[in-house]
Amino acid sequence: MSAKKDSMLIIEKEINDLKKSPLYEYRTTNKYFPVIGEGSHNAKIMFVGEAPGRNEAKTGKPFCGAAGKVLDKLLDHVNIARDSIYITNIVKDRPPENRDPTPREIEVYGPFLDRQIEIMKPRVIVALGRYSMGYIMEKFGLGDQLEPIGKAHGKVYATKSSYGEIDIVTLYHPCMAVYNPNNLNNLKKDMEVLKKYE
Ligand code: URA
């Protein structure tokens, strides 16, 4: 087994046993799974969503419900194969009723995302939605450039990570086109910023 896979499995085990999480009891009562992430551990591009929804918690796979169908369309639009990237979330367990993640949940799960980034060393992180954008931009020292997602969508921020250059791309969350399919074309247009990483 590869060293990256080993390290990811350690993270998976820790999250499985994460009794201190405010979402642990909700997960176990509902027989849900935590969603660790999916895709290539060698991917150049890591997508970071917000938190699993119901379909994701039932299967343990990220973006496999309605928002995932939108994400698949966006990836198709720029010819990026889903298995060539890595997809994860900041919060690894489903918040009840798909409510927004709380600051405490982000504080509990954020360090696991930090470790996943250190393991994979992606060249590009695509932050989906305002929570992911806020966390990732703060983490990479871009907090002073934070804007509302309505302004930041489709932007690329070149910065430095512990392992070298990294680009942070901020996009609307795909659920925008679940609530209103008319948004799909705008999401597709923003997605085109990823073409330069082909
Ligand atoms: N929304 C997210 O942010 N992540 C998922 O995995 C699914 C829906």
Image: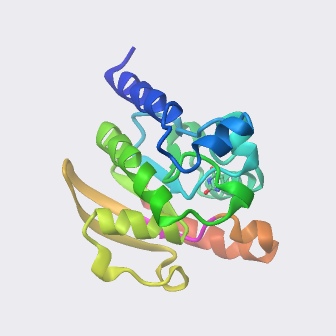
Q: Position of residue 151 (x, y in %)?
A: 50, 85
Locate residue 87, reporting x and y percent: 53, 45
Q: Is residue 175 visible?
A: yes
Specify how the rendered protein is coloured.
rainbow
Q: Position of residue 84 (x, y in %)?
A: 51, 39
Q: Which residues are magenta?
A: 169-173
- Residue 172 colored magenta? yes
Image side of residue 46 versus residue 39, left or right: left
Q: Position of residue 161 (x, y in %)?
A: 22, 55
Residue nearest the viewer, comparing 153 with 97: 97
Q: Looking at the figure, which quarter contains the N terminus?
A: top left
Q: Residue at x 48, y 34 (%)?
A: 40
Above or below, comparing residue 198 to residue 120 in the picture = below
Vertical placement of residue 62 versus 186, above or below: above
Residue lying farthest to the top in this orientation? 1
Residue under the image location 31 percent in, 75 percent down: 143
Between 18 and 183, which is closer to the camera in this rendering? Answer: 18
Q: Is residue 163 magenta?
A: no
Vertical relation: 86 (above or below) 142: above
Decide if residue 104 is on the left or right side of residue 7.
right
Question: Quarter-wise, where is residue 27 in the image?
Answer: top right
Q: Identify the residue at horizontal 65%, vertical 35% (top origin).
A: 33
Magenta stretch, main secondary structure class? strand
Work out whether residue 193 can be spotted.
Answer: no
Quadrant of the picture in which ligand 1 is shown: bottom right
